[in-house]
């Protein structure tokens, strides 16, 4: 867990939960990641979305995520979140959320799903190529 003081309030960052991932999709969909992406370049990639990003990953200490008003928190961060703290939040994000491990895991799951789909297609084609018993004569069945 990481702690920050912003505008006289204490905020924390913990590993992402699915609700935050869902919220993050909106921001990430606006970003074009190149093949040379490095976490250090995240501030440049996020641009004007830094306060929104921080509003998603941070929560006021003692506050439940479901009670957080993203719009109000983004506005507050636009006014009170300094650049140094923003950079620290981004750096801690990559320590707190091992993105490389997550993406490798998802890639592994994707490969596994691909194998299952290919195997099912093979089985279906074999089943479809077997003649049906209805159109088969008694002599052929023997």
Image: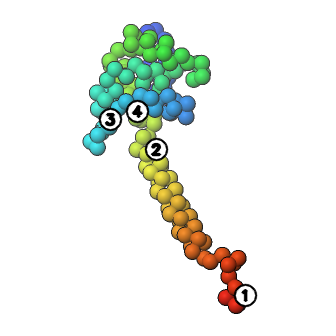
* Residue at the spot of label 2: 102
Picture layout, residue 10 above or below residue 92: above
Q: Bin the neighbour count of mark 2 within 10 Å (Cα to Cα): few under 14, some 14-19, many 20 and up.
A: few
Q: Do the numbered discs 1 and 3 sit on residues whose CB atoms are within 8 Å?
A: no
| CA gap, disc 1 and disc 3 | 65 Å
Eye-nearest disc, 1 or 2: 1
At mark 1, the secondary structure is: helix
Q: Position of residue 67 (x, y in %)?
A: 60, 18
* Residue at the spot of label 3: 32
Q: Which numbered circle lies on residue 29?
A: 4
Sequence-first tag of 1 and 3: 3
To which quarter of the image does residue 96 belong? top left
* Residue at the spot of label 1: 138
Identify which residue, 40 or 130, lies in the foreground.
130
At mark 3, the secondary structure is: loop
Sequence-first tag of 4 and 1: 4
Identify which residue, 54 or 34, lies in the foreground.
34
Q: Position of residue 71 (x, y in %)?
A: 48, 15
């Amino acid at each position: 867990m990481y702690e920050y003081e912003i505008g006289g309030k204490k905020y924390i960052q913990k590993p992402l939960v699915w609700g935050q991932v869902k919220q993050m999709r909106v921001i990430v969909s606006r970003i074009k990641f190149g093949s040379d992406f490095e976490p250090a370049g995240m501030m440049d990639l996020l641009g004007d979305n830094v306060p929104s990003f921080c509003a998603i990953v941070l929560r006021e200490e003692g506050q439940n995520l479901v009670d957080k008003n993203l719009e109000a928190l983004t506005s507050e961060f636009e006014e009170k979140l300094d650049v140094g703290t923003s950079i620290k939040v981004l750096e801690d994000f990559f320590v707190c959320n091992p993105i490389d491990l997550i993406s490798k895991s998802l890639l592994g799951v994707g490969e596994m799903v691909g194998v299952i789909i290919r195997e099912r297609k093979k089985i279906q084609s074999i089943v479809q190529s077997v003649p049906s018993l209805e159109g088969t004569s008694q002599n052929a069945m023997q």
